[in-house]
Image (cartoon, grey):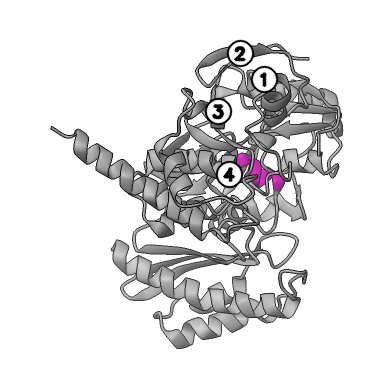
Amino acid sequence: MKLPHVDYEAPKAVSEAVELLAEHLDEASVLAGGQSLIPLLALRLAHPAVLIDINGIDELSGVSSADGWVAVGAMTREYVAEESEIVAGTVPLLAAALPLIGHEAIRSRGTIGGSMAHADPAAELPAVARALDAEFVVRGQSGERVVPAAEWFEGYLMTSRRPDELLVEVRFPAAGPGTGVSFQEVARRHGDFAIVGLAASLTLSEGVISDARLAFAGVSDVPVRAVDAEDLLVGEAPSAELFGEAARRATDDLDPPGDLHGSSDYRKKVAATLVRRGLRAAADNAYERQ
Amino acid sequence: MVEITLTVNGATCAGSPEARKTLADFLRDDLNLTGTHLGCEHGACGACTVIVDGRAVRSCLMLAVQAAGSEVVTIEGLAPDGGLGILQQAMWDSHSFQCGFCTPGFVMQAVAFLSDHPDAGEQQIREALSGNICRCTGYQSIIDGVLLAAERGRERRAGERP
C-alpha cells in the first residue's frame, strides 16, 4: 500500500526537532529508522499530519560509556550497536538481543530509540531495557528528564514520552563482574517477532547468585519483569531445581494474550521453558565470562 | 515535493518525489528501474531489497527523500554489461528460482551478505535470507545457489593470490 499524504520535516538539530514537536504535538510522528512507522502508515494504522524525520540529526547517533553506564543515542542503528565493541563488552544482554531483531535488512535501518519509542511488547529491546533498568532520556523545550524503564512502558505501543518530547538517548548499566546473560525466544522463523521472549541476566559471586534479572517479551501489553522469581534466585546457588521453581514463580501470574501464533496457555508454557533455558544459559555464560 | 540527488548504480540521479514516496516507488516509477519488485509494501516479504550505502535495506520501508546523497545499488546495477555476477550465475546454475518474483530481493540481500561474510556457511546464509519470502522454491535451491556463489567466490580469491 502506498503511504498517505503527509507533511515532512527534516530537522538537523535536536533543538529544531523539539520545536517542531511542540508545534505539532499529537499530529506529528517522529521518523527514526521507519521499520515500524512506515508499515503503520502504509496500513493506515497511524495518521500523522507531519513526519519529523530525525535521520539527519548527527548528535543522536553513537555509543559511549562513562561512570558504569553505556549511553546509546536514539538514532543509533541496530546494526551499529550490534557491531559496537562497547556494547559487546559492557552490555552483553543488549548484545545478545540485537541479532534477534527482525532481519539483516531491518537492522540496517532500525534504531535503538525507535524500537523503544514504538514500544512493541513483543520486541526484544524493551525487554532488555526492563531487565536492566535502563534509563530513557527525553528532551522537550523545557529541558531534559530521565525516565526509568519501569515507568517508560505504559501499554501497547504506548510510552510515557509526552507529545512535545523527543527520546534522545537510552542508558544501560554496565554489567558487573560475574554477570552472565541470555536472550531466549521462540519464534516461527528467525527474525520474526517472538511468540515469547526472555531477557535473563544472572550475577554470580562465590558460587551464589547475587543479582537476577528476568524480563519477558510477548506475554502482556508491556514487557514484564518477573520480580518474584528474581527474589527467589538471589542468595541461592544455581541448580536445575532452583531454575524450575523460578520458572513456576515467574509464570504463575502470567495471563498472556492468545492469537493465531499461540494460545495464552501455550505462551505460558513457553515462558516457563524459556526461564529454565535462559537461567541455565545465563549461568553458563557467567562461568565462561569469569 | 522535495529535491533530491543520489547515486543509483553508479550514475547520479536527481528527482523531486513527494515526501511520502518510498525509495522503491521512486526507483520503479521515477527512474524506471523496475527490477526492484514490490510484494507486500510493508516490510514483510523482502522482495524490494536494495543496497543503500553498502547495506541491504527494504526500499519499501525507506522514503525516497531519505536516500538523498546515498549510493543505491539495485538488481540492474549488479552486472551493468548485461552479463551475470558470480551470485547470479550460481543461482542460475542451481535453479534458484521458479516464478522469479522474489529473486531480485534475494539476490540483493545475498550480495550484501556475502560481501560482508564471504566464508558464510549454510546456517548463516539461511539466517541472513530469513527475511525474504519465496512462495515457489521451498528455499533449498536458493540456499544452494548462494552456497555455490560463496564457494566460487572463495575459489576466485584463492586463484588471485600470488
* Residue on which disc 3 sits: B76
Q: Is residue A172 left or right of residue A51?
A: left
Q: Chain of mark 4?
A: B
Could you say where residue A192 lies in the image, as x and y percent from the top left?
Answer: 62, 58
Q: What amino acid is found at the position of numbered circle 4 in the picture?
A: Thr
Is the residue marked by circle 3 packed among few (<14), some (14-19), or many (20+) residues within 10 Å? some
Of residues B140 and A166, the one drawn nearer to the viewer in this rendering: B140
Could you say where residue B65 lies in the image, as x and y percent from the top left?
Answer: 68, 21
Q: CA distance from mark 1 to mark 3?
A: 12 Å
Q: CA distance from mark 4 to mark 1?
A: 20 Å
Is there CB contact under 8 Å for labels 2 and 4? no
Q: Quadrant of residue A222?
A: bottom right
* Residue on which disc 4 sits: B103
Q: What amino acid is found at the position of numbered circle 2 in the picture?
A: Cys
Q: Is there any visible trace of residue A256 in the rendered image?
A: yes
Which label sits in the foreground, 2 or 3? 3
In the image, what residue occupies the spot 58% across and 16% down? B6
* Residue on which disc 1 sits: B31
- The residues colored magenta run A113-118
Q: CA distance from mark 1 to mark 2?
A: 8 Å
Whether labels 3 and 4 share one chain: yes
- Name the main secondary structure of what is drawn in magenta: helix
Is there CB contact under 8 Å for labels 1 and 2? yes
* Mark positioned earlier in the residue sequence (4 or 1): 1
In the image, what residue occupies the spot 69% across and 27% down? B28
* Mark positioned earlier in the residue sequence (1 or 3): 1
Q: CA distance from mark 2 to mark 3?
A: 15 Å
Q: Residue B13: which numbered mark, if any?
A: 2
* Mark positioned earlier in the residue sequence (1 or 2): 2
